[in-house]
Amino acid sequence: MTEWYFVWVEGLRGPMPQKWSSEGLWGQIGRQDVIVRFALDDAEAHLPIDELAKRHPIPDRK
């Protein structure tokens, strides 16, 4: 069964949202540019990235 994650990564112009599947996660775990990763339930896995960004905003970085 494929698990889905909503991920914020450091981009060239600031944080960028991405959606990753467990099938493509191999090699991604150790990335240094990952700010935060959220596991998605079945209902959220089908949502577009802009909706996921509203539900899972980037945490305050102080």
Image (tube, rainbow, N blue to C red):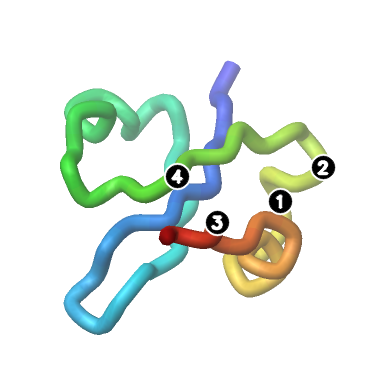
Q: Is residue 54 above or below residue 46?
A: below
Residue kind at label 4, given as amino acid type: Val
Q: In the rendered view, does 31 fall on the left or right side of 6? A: left
- Nearer the camera: disc 3 or disc 4: 3
In contact (CB < 8 Å): disc 3 and disc 4: yes
| Mark 2 vs 3, N-terminal side | 2
Which circle, 2 or 3, is nearer the viewer?
3
Residue at 22 percent across and 51 percent down: it is 33
Q: Earlier in the sequence, mark 1 or mark 3?
A: 1
Q: Could you tell which of marks 3 and 4 lies nearer the N-terminus?
A: 4
Helix, strand or loop under label 3: loop
- Relative depth, front residue between 23 and 51: 51
State the residue position of label 3: 59
Q: Secondary structure at mark 1?
A: helix
Distance, label 2 to label 1, CA atoms, is 6 Å
Residue at the front extreme of this rendering: 62
Q: Which numbered tag is attached to residue 36? A: 4
**Residue identified by numbered label 2:** 43
* Mark 4 element type: strand
Numbered badge on residue 46: 1
Check if mark 2's residue and mark 1's residue have beta carbons within 8 Å: yes
Which residue does the image show at 68% across and 44% down from the upper left?
45
Mark 4 Cα-neighbour bin, 10 Å: few <14, some 14–19, many ≥20: some
Which quadrant of the structure image shows residue 17?
bottom left
Residue 7: horizontal and vertical position, in percent?
46, 49
Distance Cα–Cα, label 3 vs label 4: 8 Å
Nearest-to-viewer mark from 4 and 2: 4
